Image (cartoon, helix red, strand yellow):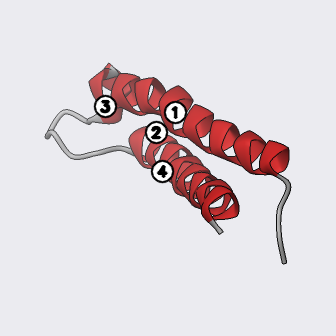
């Protein structure tokens, strides 16, 4: 099955956008005072943000890989 180059480029762009857009959110969550409790343990706030950002970044990476494979193959 072949993919039109335009669709492949859209997938690459969408994947890269997801990686680029979620990285600052993840870094901001790490620096947020709500991320750790008094003992320094990570809180549910950070766990929630981390899972949201990491899942979106993994899906973005998968999307970009599919787009690149569409361009190459």
Q: CA distance from mark 3 to mark 1?
A: 13 Å
Image point (43%, 49%), residue name: 47
Does the CB distance between marks 2 and 4 fall below 8 Å?
Answer: no
Q: Earlier in the sequence, mark 3 or mark 2?
A: 3
Q: Secondary structure at mark 1?
A: helix
Location of residue 64 in the rendering, given as x and y in whole percent from the top left corner: 60, 51
Location of residue 14 in the rendering, given as x and y in whole percent from the top left corner: 69, 39
Q: In the rendered image, which quarter is residue 55 located in?
A: bottom right
Q: CA distance from mark 2 to mark 1?
A: 16 Å
Residue under pointer 2: 45
Q: Earlier in the sequence, mark 2 or mark 4?
A: 2
Q: Earlier in the sequence, mark 4 or mark 1?
A: 1
- The crowding category of the residue bearing disc 3, from other C-alpha atoms within 10 Å (few below 14, some 14 to 19, many at least 20), is some
Tell me the mark number nearer the camera, choosing from 4 and 3: 4
Residue under pointer 3: 30
Q: Earlier in the sequence, mark 3 or mark 1?
A: 1
Q: CA distance from mark 4 to mark 1?
A: 8 Å
Location of residue 70 in the rendering, given as x and y in whole percent from the top left corner: 70, 61
- The crowding category of the residue bearing disc 2, from other C-alpha atoms within 10 Å (few below 14, some 14 to 19, many at least 20), is some
Q: Secondary structure at mark 2?
A: helix
Location of residue 68 in the rendering, given as x and y in whole percent from the top left corner: 60, 56
Can you tell which mark lies on residue 54?
A: 4
Q: CA distance from mark 4 to mark 3?
A: 13 Å
């Amino acid at each position: 099955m072949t993919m039109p180059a335009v669709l492949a480029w859209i997938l690459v762009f969408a994947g890269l956008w997801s990686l680029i857009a979620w990285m600052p959110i993840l870094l901001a969550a790490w620096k947020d005072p709500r991320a750790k409790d008094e003992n320094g343990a990570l809180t549910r706030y950070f766990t929630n943000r981390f899972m949201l950002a990491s899942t979106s970044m993994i899906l973005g990476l998968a999307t970009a890989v599919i787009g690149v494979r569409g361009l190459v193959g």
